[in-house]
Amino acid sequence: MAAGGFGTFGRRAIHPLATAAMATFAAVRPRARDDSRHGRRPFANGGRPAPDNDVQTPQPSINNHRAYPIPHTRRSKVTAKVFCIGFHKTGTTSLAEALQVLGYRVTGPNGVRNPDIATKVRPMAWDLVEKYDAFQDNPWPILYRELDLRYPGSKFVLTMRSTESWLRSQLKHFGERETAMRKWIYGDTHGCPQGNEEVYVRRYETHNREVQEYFRDRPDDLLVMELAKGDGWEKLAPFLGKPMPAMPFPHANKAGDRALVAKLLKKGKAQLAHMGVRLA
């Protein structure tokens, strides 16, 4: 396995999602050996075996929380909570993976399928803060003022990208699909980006401006990152008081990675069909 969690496919680097996709199809084929006989045990992080001294992130009890497994290193001591308060589709998944590498227990997005999120978001959030070290994606950006007051000494990271590219991503991924979370963020009649472009842009730009104004006199508490412009370890690690990792900064959800995964899935389905295996 190469640095940064990428495997190899011939001479081409493979994203962990692609590795997981291939592992899914390989699972239905007869195995040459039983891995349990070789001292290995199942592990959720890409199917890799976990050393006995790994610290594993506790998995949430409901399916609308996402917890990120701790990487294969002993978790370093965490002295302050880290709240990632950039809007969704600004590199939040990449930042979550980077925080994992630095030893944080990361969760988010949270409550995205809860139809009552508007009234239940705060009890849910305060409970999760007691269980994790770092928090990303919704609903955390909307709560930054309250989080700052409730958890003094915390660190805040604002991820940003150009308004035009952010809106394109919103429309591509969410389109006309409404959610209670987006209604809470953008307004009851604006639960999807399609047809509400002006509302979404105004909310996005206002959030970024207000966050920077709020922390204007506290440069040690807020870090602004633009991953699309190359921001990475050189900004994040010193801000959190962590040593600089030797691996490349993660860049998750790239269009090229998604295309490769889709290609592998298509090829895998064809191979399974040839073997007489049908996927639901």
Image (spheres, rainbow, N blue to C red):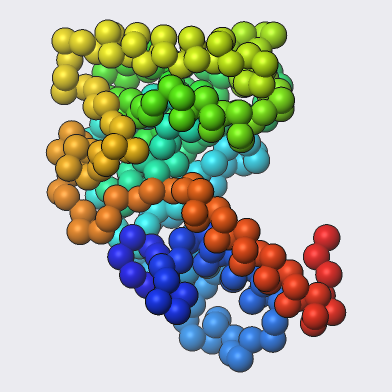
Q: Is residue 178 left or right of residue 251?
A: right
The residue at 28%/14% (across/down) is 212
Residue 262 screen position, x and y as percent: 62, 59
Residue 203 can be seen, yes or no: yes
Report the front residue among 25 and 268: 268
Work out whether residue 50 or residue 177 is closer to the camera in this orientation and state it.
177
How many numbered marks does the figure carry?
A: 0
- Which image quadrant is residue 196 in? top right
Residue 220 image position (x, y, % from top left): 16, 23
Q: Residue 128 in the image: state x and y as whole percent.
A: 48, 31
**Residue visible at 36% across and 16% down?**
208
Q: Is residue 76 above or below residue 39?
A: above
In the rendered image, the vertical position of residue 37 relative to residue 58, given as above or below: below
> In this rendering, does residue 117 appear at all?
no
When the figure is inspected, residue 186 is found, relative to residue 263, above or below; the finding is: above
**Residue appearing at x 47%, y 48% in the figure:** 254
Q: Nearer the viewer, residue 267 or 109?
A: 267
* Residue name at image x 55 percent, y 53 percent: 258
Q: Is residue 68 left or right of residue 102?
A: right
Q: Residue furthest front?
A: 164
Q: Quadrant of the C terminus?
A: bottom right
Placement of 180 over or under 216, stated as above or below? below
Name the quadrant of the N terminus.
Answer: bottom left
Tell me residue 271's x, y (percent).
73, 77
